[in-house]
Image: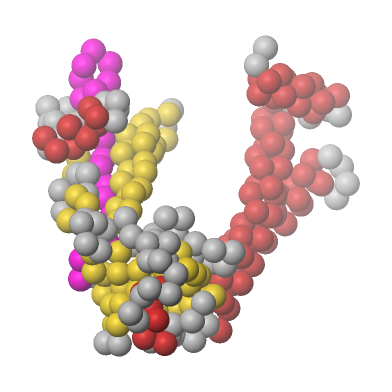
Amino acid sequence: MPESQAFAYNAGISLQNIGIDGSDARILMVAIAGMIIGTGLFFHGFTLLKRRQMIQNTPTSKIRSIAMGPVEVHGKAVPAEKKIMESPFSGKQCVWYRYTVEEYRTTGKHHYWATVKNGDSGVPFFVKDETGSVLVNPKGAEADIPMDYECNSGFGKDPPARVRKFLKSDAAGFEGLFGINSTMRYREYFIAPGDKLYVMGTAADNPYVEEGRGTKNEEDIMIQKGANFFYISDKPEKEVVSSMAWKIAASTIGGVIMAVGGLAITLLYIGLL
């Protein structure tokens, strides 16, 4: 018997031993799950709060006067020489992209989009303001970029040729049983040349420039993932802080409600409340 099934089986026996079975057991399991998820959401809210405080407490640097360590800059994305990509679905020029492939599924009375494949890729690019430019390596960044492209496929409708080519190269498909097209959704997010960006990361040595050989201070520096929060967004800082405030409130308040509610139901069912 698989480990997951054995766990569920043993849990069922344990609940039966204390006089809980059937629908009551299912309600209790949902309550316990809610308590665990709620606790996770609550602590996630504090993580977001810490990140928001870091953004608010880090002054925006002009690129010409950038220093090593945690840094925050604003500017336009500029491709580095011979460092340009094409997004996988729309073929747009970019320096970073993320994609998702989702399938529309039905389980009983429930309908939902399930992610069957996703990924991202990027190349080092410059962020330029009125004082200069600095290299940014987007690897490992949390990118808050809106969706730029979406297309669909389904019964009697194939995905666009470029999407089919990408799926074939990635050993993924869009057909279901008997070769009939599944209902699929393809989404793409990217940073294009000229996009205005807010970047918070760690300014460290630029590995592409020999130490001390840069003609300007910022040429010896690259913003990258370090010990601190690494974040890239096309929103202004005020919008970033505002959106985080809503996420913090939703995560902490929602987490408390779920955790307390789950705990109360659990204690009620086991006779301790």
Q: Residue at x 84, y 40 (%)?
A: 270
| 35 to 167, vertically: above or below | below
Q: Tell me the colour scheme of the image.
A: secondary structure
Left or right of residue 154, residue 255 in this image: right
Q: Which region is colored magenta?
A: 175-194
Q: Residue at x 61, y 60 (%)?
A: 44
Q: Nearer the viewer, residue 195 or 246?
A: 195
Q: At which x and y percent is residue 199? A: 40, 72
Q: Nearer the viewer, residue 203 or 140?
A: 203
Q: Residue at x 19, y 50 (%)?
A: 86
Q: Residue at x 11, y 35 (%)?
A: 161
Q: How many marks?
A: 0
Left or right of residue 173, residue 31 in this image: right
Q: At which x and y percent is residue 263? A: 76, 50
| 30 to 192, vertically: above or below | above
The answer to whether residue 186 shows anywhere in this view is: yes
Q: At which x and y percent is residue 63? A: 37, 82
Q: Quadrant of residue 266?
A: top right
Asked whether residue 151 is drawn in magenta, I would say: no
Q: At which x and y percent is residue 154? A: 19, 31
The answer to whether residue 183 shows anywhere in this view is: no
Left or right of residue 49, residue 222 in this image: left
Q: Nearer the viewer, residue 117 or 15?
A: 117
| 12 to 259, vertically: above or below | above
Q: Quadrant of residue 189?
A: bottom left
Left or right of residue 245, residue 134 in this image: left
Asked whether residue 191 is drawn in magenta, I would say: yes
Q: Quadrant of the N terminus?
A: top right
